[in-house]
Amino acid sequence: MTVVDGVCPLMTDPEAWDLYIKGGVDIAAPTVANWETPDQTRQLLEQWARWTTEDSRLRAVTEPSHFDLFPESGKLGVIIHFQNAAPLGDDLDNYRRFYDLGLRMVQLCYNFANRLGDGCLSREDGPLTSFGRQSIQEMNRLGIVVDLSHTGRRTTFDAMEVASAPPVFSHSNPGALCPHRRNIDDHQIKAVAELGGLVGVVTFPPLVKPGGKGGTVADLVNHIDYLVDLIGPDQVGLGLDFCETSPEFMAEMIGSGGWTVEDYPPDTDPRLLDLTSPTDIPNIRQELIRRGYPATAIEGILGQNWINLFKNVWAGGTGS
């Protein structure tokens, strides 16, 4: 069984790599860029290329055949992910340039509007822009996965109409269980599933349990249960989103305007009580077993569904 975590901002710190390895993760998607300039982003991508080449713990995953190397390789596979399209700037050629440097998944927006569309915390719920349509078409052409998490509802539906390859909600939970502007409704879930896409469950406590306190792996798996009941087990995965949760970091994010106090309350639990680190990821498997999930469904949810999605989108692209 190959375990895949589709959203890993914590991995920007090399000290966290061993946490994922100890937690049994085989392939992870670090958040390499959010708001950086294109030049800063190029430097970050070049840094990751050096790390995946020179560090014995890591291996870049950029082609469908690379998945066949896991878990036997004994390395932590790395899929480059941006949690915002802003670092690509306003030049469509940057998608090709960054694809050549390893970029394989891009989230359209991060909470608020950018040149592509609107974010999920925006009051306006604006549409996908003309540049957003062009960006999705270019990502589909290259074989870059389109990620709709953090993106406004209207923009997500517009994007799904434009997409010619399956998109994903990489780290979003069902709003029916936990009402929050960052979560998604049943219509969004069904729409992405109809396109062959995937929904990854996220561990950030306010997105798991109303109020964001006292949440556990059992609460997280309730979201998996809900998704499986709604769209089946083959389009559900992990997008755990372990990130920095210190009070200083949260204050910085709120102060910068990336987060709001309403949606990211500073007094929330920093992590789920029994999922405080990537080393606790095996607890998810144990809860799925306890609930009687078949082995094939567990294998899919913990990683194979992501692998199938990536293989499909990447193989359908032309590359650079």
Image (cartoon, rainbow, N blue to C red):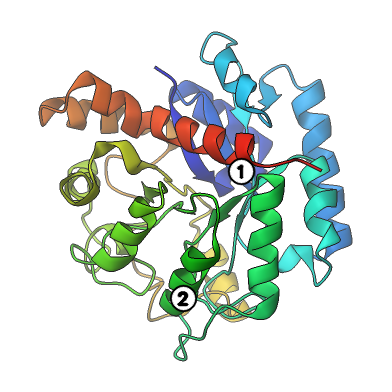
Quickly name the residue at label 1. Answer: 30
Q: Is residue 134 left or right of residue 121?
A: right
For mark 1, give the secondary structure: strand
Q: Is residue 29 left or right of residue 262?
A: right
Visible residue check, residue 93: yes
Mark 2 to mark 1 CA distance (whole Å): 22 Å
- The residue closer to the viewer here, 238 or 270, is 238
Q: Position of residue 267 (x, y in %)?
A: 35, 69
For mark 2, give the secondary structure: loop
- The residue closer to the viewer here, 93 or 219, is 93
Amino acid type, residue under disc 2 in the picture: Gly
In the rendered view of the protein, which quadrant contains the C terminus? top right
Q: Position of residue 228 (x, y in %)?
A: 21, 44
Q: Position of residue 72 (x, y in %)?
A: 54, 8
Q: Position of residue 200 (x, y in %)?
A: 39, 47
Label 2 or label 1, whichever comes before in sequence order: 1
Amino acid type, residue under disc 1 in the picture: Pro
Foreground mark, 2 or 1? 2
- The residue closer to the viewer here, 153 or 222, is 153
Quickly name the residue at label 2. Answer: 152
Q: Which image quadrant for residue 177? A: bottom left
